[in-house]
Amino acid sequence: MWYPIFITAATGYLLGNINGAVCISALLNDDVRSHGSGNAGLTNFFRNFGGKGTLFVLIIDMIKTLLACAVGSLLLKPFGLQLEGCMFGGVCASLGHDFPALLGFRGGKGIVCGLSVAIAADWRIAVMIVLVFLVCFFLTHYVSLGSILASATFGIAFGILHWGEPYVVCLAAAIAALAVFMHRSNISRLLKGTESKVYLKKKGEK
């Protein structure tokens, strides 16, 4: 059983290293990490490159995580741990996204990865976290706050809906905790009132 676990971990982590924001900005002869917050994530890409390419960033980060979940699910299914394998693959992809060895450990914050794990593991939770994020974002225009609340919802929802599956709950808690941890600087700015807001349209634009 240790062999499929190792393969899941290695595959998930390496897939996580495929960063959508870095890839698309490279195609534009640039590096998203040299702009704004320096974060290789969807929000920083959107802030600095606009809508151009943002959809492709989202697609790349979702596909890599879904593949990691699929590998884990497939390899651990024979041991009766299909959902656990899916979650484990997602954890490894999130770690690869946040701390990519192939990119100098300068990655993103894993929110899209978390959403993708929810899509693969339990669509009900995916719907919940999207709704929480959208409501928070459109009320406050803080992507970070929406992401933090969505991450908390992720962990709580898995804890409630999969209470009888301790490994699933623990892995979900790990993904949620990691996402919140990656937003620690945003939390500090939110508390200080210095966090930047994001608007889908520039002011004055119709």
Image: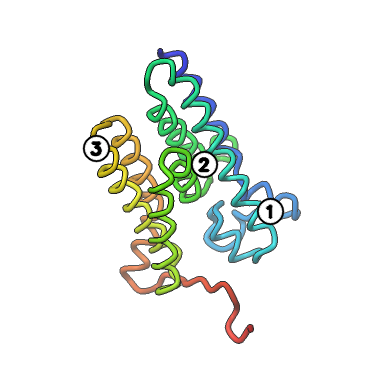
Task: Look at discs 2 and 3 and give the one toward the viewer.
Answer: 3
The amino acid type of the residue labelled 3 equals Trp
Residue 122 appears at what percent x and percent y? 41, 41
Task: State the image quarter where residue 168 is shown.
Answer: top left
Between the C-alphas of marks 1 and 2, the distance is 16 Å
Assign the C terminus to one quadrant of the image.
bottom right
Q: What is the number of the mark on residue 25?
A: 1
The residue under the point 54% across, 37% down is 66
Q: Is residue 29 left or right of residue 85?
A: right
Q: Is residue 18 above or below residue 140?
A: above
The amino acid type of the residue labelled 2 equals His
Q: Which residue is mark 2?
A: 97
Q: Earlier in the sequence, mark 1 or mark 3?
A: 1
Q: Secondary structure at mark 2?
A: helix
Q: Is residue 80 above or below residue 145?
A: above
Q: How many marks?
A: 3
Q: Residues within 10 Å of mark 3 (few under 14, many from 20)?
A: few
Q: Which residue is mark 3?
A: 163
Q: Is residue 102 left or right of residue 144?
A: right
The amino acid type of the residue labelled 1 equals Ser
Task: State the image quarter where residue 17 is shown.
Answer: top right
Residue 13 appears at what percent x and percent y? 51, 32
Task: Look at discs 1 and 3 and give the one toward the viewer.
Answer: 3
Between the C-alphas of marks 2 and 3, the distance is 27 Å
Q: Is residue 18 left or right of residue 195?
A: right
